Image (cartoon, helix red, strand yellow):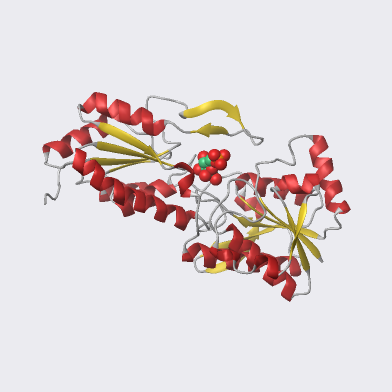
Amino acid sequence: MKIGILTGGGDCPGLNAVIRGAVIGLVQQGHSAIGLRHGWKGLLDKETVPLGLADVDGIERTGGTILKTSRTNPYKTEETRKAALESFKALGLDAIIAVGGDDTLGACHKLTQDGVPAVGVPKTIDNDLSGTDVTFGFDTATNIVTEAIDRLHTTAGSHERILVVEIMGRHAGWITLHGGLAGGAHVILVPEEPFDLGAVAEVCKARRAAGADHTIVAVSEGAMATDVDSFVTQDKSVDEFGHVRLGGIGKTLAKELERLTGQEARHVVLGHLQRGGVPSAFDRVLGLRLGLAAAHAVHDKDFGKMVALKGTDIERVAIATAVGTLRTVPEERLEEKRQLLSSIATVTRTA
Ligand code: F6P
């Protein structure tokens, strides 16, 4: 069989590991692979690259995606849908392995319903896909956030400031929660739990009163205060899947906290640093395993499936289970966070 592999949506550390794992698995079972460049755009435009073993040698150690990516939606119009189906035939493909998040896998699911044999691989640093316990890229992003917060403590302490760290996560606060806990943030604000601005200011004030020299506030880009009903966005433009560009909550929050507490505040937007650079060991291994498992699913002609991490095993689940409903941080994890941060306002270790 001839298999097209594509990576869609935001890039993510571990994508190249998936590509390598898939190519190894396909070649070992007598199949061939080609890369479709720039996500679904590569299918529409028939833009391909050869993907042999030599092309993927060692790429699991690298960041980004050698296939490039885009947020192109093949189901944007009836014309693009037809073009995708025609391209699949014209390229002589037997199946597609699509590596992506909710949007890419959603399109993949629709293609399978239109008769295109396909297997999905879940990808997002946000860790918010249903049907899998963890997504690759999340571990790397969390490590980057942790290191950033570690560093921010000393500069915030030296200047006796509040430092607000804006972290990726549109609807799910996984990176903020894990990066915030690991980095010792004093306040962690996630999209799943609207926050009371006054209460955050009180934490900063109480910490100062207890002798603390700084407060770190970790906030997801998609977090919202209780008295607002829309995201803080960079502008009103939307991508092909209808998403606005988030960003700005960190700046807004720092300004408001400065006003409410009288303490100096600064903000940092970690942005695309969280997606860039080499993947962690965990994400390299997970990516390789998922890629290999996707190749096995193709070989077995088990189409319409997504390979997923369940516990420590890679299993196959229906792509349909992964799309449409995001896996947000559940209440019990929020409660854990509340308990872990419960003494943060009043107990501080002074050197
Ligand atoms: O991949 C998901 C994500 O990382 C979101 O957390 C974020 O909102 C978005 O990508 C930003 O993507 P870009 O700026 O690349 O369009």
Q: Is residue 296 visible?
A: no
Point out residue 85 in the picture as x, y percentages from the top left corner. Answer: 83, 47
Q: Is residue 89 left or right of residue 293?
A: right
**At 65% from the left edge and 36% from the top edge, which residue is drawn?**
241
Point out residue 129 in the picture as x, y percentages from the top left corner. Answer: 55, 50
How many numbered badges does the structure rendering display? 0
* Residue 232 drawn above or below residue 322: above
* Residue 323 drawn above or below residue 30: above
Point out residue 94 in the picture as x, y percentages from the top left corner. Answer: 82, 60
Residue 41, by quadrant, is top right
Point out residue 96 in the picture as x, y percentages from the top left corner. Answer: 75, 57
* Residue 182 drawn above or below residue 53: above
Quarter the N terminus occupies: bottom right
Residue 229, by quadrant, is top left
Between 81 and 229, which is closer to the camera in this rendering?
A: 81
Between 87 and 341, which is closer to the camera in this rendering?
A: 87
**At 34% from the left edge and 35% from the top edge, which residue is drawn?**
267
Q: Is residue 270 visible?
A: yes
Q: Is residue 160 left or right of residue 218?
A: left
* Residue 321 drawn above or below residue 220: below
**At 69% from the left edge and 41% from the top edge, which residue is drawn?**
72
Q: Is residue 188 left or right of residue 220?
A: left
